[in-house]
Each structure stands twice: as structure tokens, then as C-alpha cells.
Image (cartoon, grey):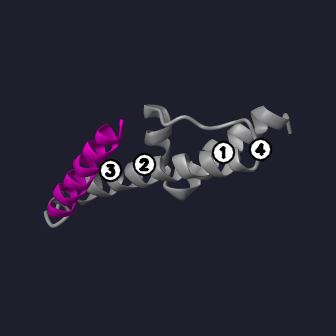
Amino acid sequence: METYYGAAAIAGICVLVVLMGMMKQKGAGLIAAFALRCFAGAIGICVMNEVLKSLGIAASAGVSPVNLVAVGTLGISGFVLIYAILLYRLFGL
């Protein structure tokens, strides 16, 4: 299992290097920014899920294509939107 995580980390770093190279091109900046926001959002969702688990809250947002598109398109506000919807469904506010 550790080999899988190591290979995934290496692949992720390679993708980031390629995307940073693409950012130098004029038209690829939007695509690269979107991809980087998706990647950062996925990491943020995983970290926030672990924080919620450590606090004893039995709810977590999944890393799904819909969530990644929301974070990639909206950025930080998409991340907040995902967890606002999660809290709304959890506590019924």
C-alpha cells in the first residue's frame, strides 16, 4: 500500500511540473490554474476530513469530480460551499 502512495505522489509531482511548464504558454494559463485549484482543493478536502475526524465529527466530503469542478471553478469559495452544504445536511441548520 505504501508503494501505491509513493507512486501517486511521484505522479502528482510530475503533473504539477508539466502544468507549471504549460503556464508559460499564453493560452494554457487558465487550464493550468484550474488544474492547480482542483489539486489544491483535493488536498484541502482530505485535510479537512481528517480534522473533522479528529474532532469526532462523523461527516466528510468526498473527493468526487463534482467537488473538484466546484473547487476548481470557484476556488476557496467552492471549498467553503462544499463544507457549508455538508454542515447544513449534518445539522439541518
The image quadrant where one finds the N terminus is: top left
Label 3–label 1 contact, CB within 8 A:
no
Which is more N-terminal, label 3 or label 2? 3
Residue that mark 4 sits on: 56
Q: Secondary structure at mark 1?
A: helix
- The answer to whether residue 37 is left or right of residue 60 is left
Main secondary structure of the magenta stretch: helix
What number is the disc on residue 72? 2
Q: Secondary structure at mark 2?
A: helix
Mark 2 → mark 3, Cα distance in angstroms: 7 Å
Residue that mark 1 sits on: 83
> Where does the magenta region start and end?
1-21
Q: Quadrant of residue 82?
A: top right
Residue that mark 3 sits on: 35
The image quadrant where one finds the C terminus is: top right
Q: Nearer the viewer, mark 4 or mark 3?
A: 4
**Residue at the image point whose x is 32% and y is 58% from the top:** 33
Number of numbered discs visible in the structure rendering: 4
x and y, in percent, of residue 67 in the image: 50, 38
Type of the residue with mark 3? Ala
x and y, in percent, of residue 84 in the image: 70, 45
Type of the residue with mark 4? Gly
- The answer to whether residue 29 is left or right of residue 44 is left
Which is more N-terminal, label 4 or label 2? 4
Label 2–label 3 contact, CB within 8 A:
yes
Q: Nearer the viewer, mark 4 or mark 1?
A: 4
Q: Residues within 10 Å of mark 2 (few under 14, many from 20)?
A: many
Type of the residue with mark 2? Gly
Label 2–label 1 contact, CB within 8 A:
no
Compared to residue 49, the image places residue 20 above or below, namely below
x and y, in percent, of residue 16 in the image: 25, 56
Mark 3 → mark 1, Cα distance in angstroms: 20 Å
